[in-house]
Amino acid sequence: MRASAPVLVVEDDASILDVVRSALEAEGYDVRTATNGKEGLERLADGKVSLVLLDMRMPVLDGWQFAKELKRRAIDVPVVVMTAAQNARHWAEEIGADAYLSKPFDLDDLLAAVARHRDS
Amino acid sequence: MGERASNVLEGLRELILGTPPIDERAQLALPMELGPSQPATTDLDKLVDVEVLHAIVDLLPDAITLIHRDGSILLRNRAAFELLGPARSVDWRVTALEEDPRHPDGRPYTLEELPARRALMDGVAVRAEPMTLRHATTGEDVSVLASSVPLRGADGAMLGATVVFRDLGALLERDRERDTFARVVGHEIQVPLTAVRGYIQQAIRQLPSGVDTSLATRSLQRADANVSRLVTLLRDVLDTSRQQLAPVVPESLELGAFLSEVHSRFDPALQSRVRLQTPDFVHVRGDRRLLEIVVVNLVDNARKYGPEEGTIEVSVAREGSVGLIRVRDDGDGIPDSDREAIFKPFRRGWNAGAHEGSGLGLYLSRQLAERHGGRLELEPSTRGTLFALSLPLA
């Protein structure tokens, strides 16, 4: 297990959440999960995370509002946006994310993005 | 039916069905007093002609207006009333007949630019020009294609003009709905596709490394390759749907300069294979961004289907009233049986299996060409494949 803080995955689709979680765990990361932005903020309260993998389209509190809330609370954590191909880059710029992954993404790309951007 | 009425009908028929301009042939002898109420003559034969003419014109789905050179409106059919509201009692020589005529980019028409005026004052035929008008009572915008031809008397004198507006609204609305549907479907497909891709890649990562010919390994690898194909296909379908709806914002483009710019954005390997031949200045009207999509598609096809390291010739020419961009490769050419099929969506033709791509490029490119009032054709060629993109001169 790596010594660094866990990765937080915020994604409303159960299958995508599951496959991302298991890929990260296989890579040796601790993983926290949330199925919408509100849960994501609650998971953040549980303790420091090294990176947030953020879906944009979620119920209750979407990715855009989650990111705004991070800014408002002055929480400084790397964010990688995961969303549909046409919008990924646009959203990443809008919320000032560190990187973006276009769905459907390649697992190698996802793991590389996490390795590159996480706080260590 | 009398000769006079049949001439007018013939003129209208050709205008509406889109055959070549008839200004040289519209030798109409309209009596000066012809109007919607009282015919000038008591000749029963001619009376019937006029009424039949009006009845037929009133049934046609396009908005039709006949204007007299003296400034008045001779005839306006039911479709015009339904599409645009009641006629304004104005002199067309001084005021536009329809409300707030604008170009697609929102710029208002000047009086001289109006199709009816161009037909009557300059004697030119206007064909399928996109315009936005405003309904006289509801104030809503109406998108149309405007056509106009002059009407001449037997002595060749200009008597009036016919103006036809075809309603684009229903078509645009249907396109918008189709795009929305495509995007919603696209998103729904992307979600499980992401999961499938992830699980397959996860399984592959779990397999022992090194060359492994077991059935399981092969199956997973092929499944992964097919998922990649699905991903590309989905992306291409959504892109195509979006580009089909993109508004055409035309400007005057000098083809040589335009192609140099597009060329400078190719990767170095492709740049060295492309030979630009732009000896003449050719100015066309086109949307720079959309035309780049077409040129990139044609060059990309030449790269994929031509010989590796072969030359791709890109040339410009002015021929008649169009400017041309031609793209030629050194490959095997396209068999006669496939020459039309390649422009159909998803039909990649004769050696499709060997190459990547969803088979939408030529389909979209032809549509983009036509939206510019131009064409994309395969031209006969003694060697290789030769595409010709023609665009109206600026």
Image: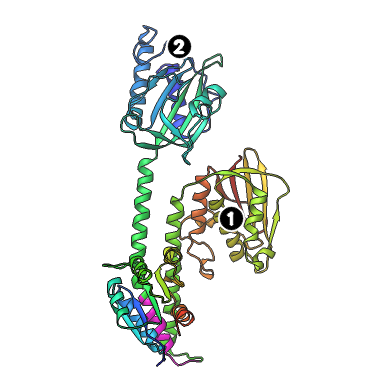
In this picture, residue A54 sits left or right of residue B376: left
Instruction: Kindly give the residue lying farthest to the top in the view shown.
Output: B42
- Which of B209 and A105 lies nearest the eye of the viewer? A105
Of labels 1 and 2, the one closer to you: 1
Q: Is residue B156 above or below residue A63?
A: above
- Which of B280 and B213 lies nearest the eye of the viewer? B280
Q: Residue at x 47, y 64 (%)?
A: B358
Q: Does dot 2 land on a helix, a strand or a loop?
A: loop
Report the chain holding disc 2.
B
Q: Residue B188 in the image: state x and y as whole percent.
A: 33, 66
In this picture, residue B139 sits left or right of residue A86: left
- Quadrant of the rendered structure where residue B81 is? top left
Residue B95 lies in the magenta-colored region? no
Q: CA separation, marks 1 and 2?
A: 52 Å
How packed mark 1 is, by other alpha carbons closer than 10 Å (few <14, some 14-19, many 20 or more), is many
Q: Which mark is residue B295?
A: 1
Q: Earlier in the sequence, mark 1 or mark 2?
A: 2
- Most common secondary structure along the magenta stretch: helix
- Which of B214 and A90 lies nearest the eye of the viewer? A90
Q: Is residue A64 above or below residue B149?
A: below
- The amino acid beneath tag 2 is Pro
Q: Specify start and end residues of the magenta stretch as a single range.
A: B195-209
In this picture, residue B72 sits left or right of residue B278: left
Q: Is residue B306 above or below residue B210?
A: above
Report the chain holding disc 1.
B
- The amino acid beneath tag 1 is Val
Q: Residue A92 in the image: state x and y as whole percent.
A: 44, 67
Name the quadrant of the C terminus of chain B. Answer: top right
Residue B207 lies in the magenta-colored region? yes
Q: Does dot 1 land on a helix, a strand or a loop?
A: helix
Q: Residue A32 in the image: state x and y as whole percent.
A: 32, 82
Q: Which mark is residue B31?
A: 2
